[in-house]
Amino acid sequence: MAKKRDHQRPAPTPGRRQNQIKPSSRRDERTEAHSPSGSIKLVAFFIVSSVIAVAVYWLRQSSPSQYNGSYVYQRGLVTTDTNYQDILTENTKVSENTSIRHYTYSVLGYITPWNSLGYEMAKRFNSKFTHLSPVWYDLKSQQSSLVLEGRHNADKGWISELKKTGEALILPRVVLEASPEELLRKKKLKNKAIDLIVTECKEMGYDGIVLESWSRWAAYGILHDPVMRNLALQFIKQLGDALHSISSEKVSGQKLQLVYVIGPPSSQNLQAHDFGPKDLETLSEVVDGFSLMTYDFSNPHKPGPNAPLEWIQIILQILLGASANRAQNIAPKIFLGINFYGNDFSLSKGGGAIIGRDYLALLEKHRPALQWDKNSGEHVFVYTADKDIKHAVFYPSLKSISLRLEEARSWGCGISIWEIGQGLDYFFDLL
């Protein structure tokens, strides 16, 4: 996926007041106030108004119905007005019952072998996920053949624990590193690649795979060639059909699944290398989910928010919005990407990715004032490091994540999280 990951609806405005008091009504009220009965009515009016105001306040503060029982909502932590003290105090606290799912569409969580915390979070919050994808495999060229590397990463004991305590499907990620010119053109190599993947799933008891290849093919420059582009799509179809011909060991009657990783279109005017709405429709019958990488919007050369909400909305509109049928039928297969990592950008010398523990350390050291960037729907703070170098830190907050969940929910989409060992514990209370 995105390079740094290999080390990764705006808030509803208050409803307009209805039934505003007209000028004539105000004159009547002033007249009544001068009489005893008018005074009594006026006092009663203020009492009732106060009661209504209190009720409205508490309704606005209460959590949405899908979050009943959520610790972070009960504590009023899902807010634009957060501060470093609350984050440091509350980030390890979650609802007592971690088996309750608040997000009812698909939830895919990535786990990386170089971050052991992800394995622990997968076990602790197993019930929150429908799919878990450990980042274990690479399919590479080996002289005139192919090899699937990564079984040494596989943790059978961890998989066994997950299967005992939850229902999440285990779909390890496979990255296609093999030369596409050879792989896609030669039937023998294509069949070999598919056989290696299917055999690994059967021998290891996986429920399918997450395949990442489009970004690699784009880097090789083959997607500008219509013939190669069609061969690429045909390969994914063939792999999907092969996986769907095998029954899952975990769920009776269910076939092995294929989730395919896609990047966001580079612009509204689609380029040859972009994975667009027509590609979605082409593959929708053979792909069970599309892991959409809606993050890494900014980088050290262009510091800024991780995934502006308006940008996410545009991406979903490009992929799903032109066709009501597409939105209805394909949206549940879109797993909107949500980052659990952030960035600490030096405003003069670059910067890079940070994860939860780095973020907490920065909060403890600098005790910053967090600002809500309403344009991106993200929290940010600025601090000054050695030699008076200014830094801007963008890291997910409960509010920023909740807005992205609501955006995905409004489309009927699932979500995919990169990656679950990089976040804070209480993020999982939103899932």
Image (tube, rainbow, N blue to C red):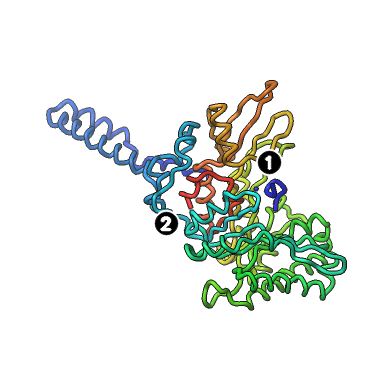
Residue 306, percent from left and from top: 63, 42
Secondary structure found at label 2: loop
Q: Which of 193 and 272 is in front in this view?
A: 193
Residue beneath the point at 53% across and 61% down:
106
Per the image, the residue denoted by label 2 is 100
Residue beneath the point at 70% across and 21% down:
387
Local packing at callout 2 (Cα closer than 10 Å; few below 14, some 14-19, many 20+) is some
Cα–Cα span, label 1 and label 2: 34 Å
95 up-or-down from 48: above or below: below
Q: Mark 1 or mark 2: which is in front? A: 2
**Outermost residue toward the right in this view:** 143
Residue beneath the point at 79% across and 62% down:
140
Is residue 402 shown left or right of residue 49? right
> In this figure, what is the number of numbered marks?
2
Residue 310, percent from left and from top: 60, 45
Is residue 167 shown left or right of residue 143? left
Q: Nearer the viewer, residue 278 or 275?
A: 275
Point out which mark residue 298 bears: 1
Q: Label 2 amino acid? A: Ile
245 up-or-down from 181: above or below: below
- Image quadrant assignment for residue 177: bottom right
Q: Which of 54 and 40 is in front in this view?
A: 54
- Image quadrant assignment for residue 247: bottom right
Residue 373 visible (yes or no): no
Residue 223, percent from left and from top: 80, 60
Q: Label 1 amino acid? A: Ser
Point out which mark residue 29 bears: none
Q: Are marks 1 and 2 in contact (CB under 8 Å)?
A: no
**Outermost residue toward the top in this view:** 387
Residue 96 visible (yes or no): yes
Residue 335, percent from left and from top: 59, 58
Secondary structure found at label 1: loop
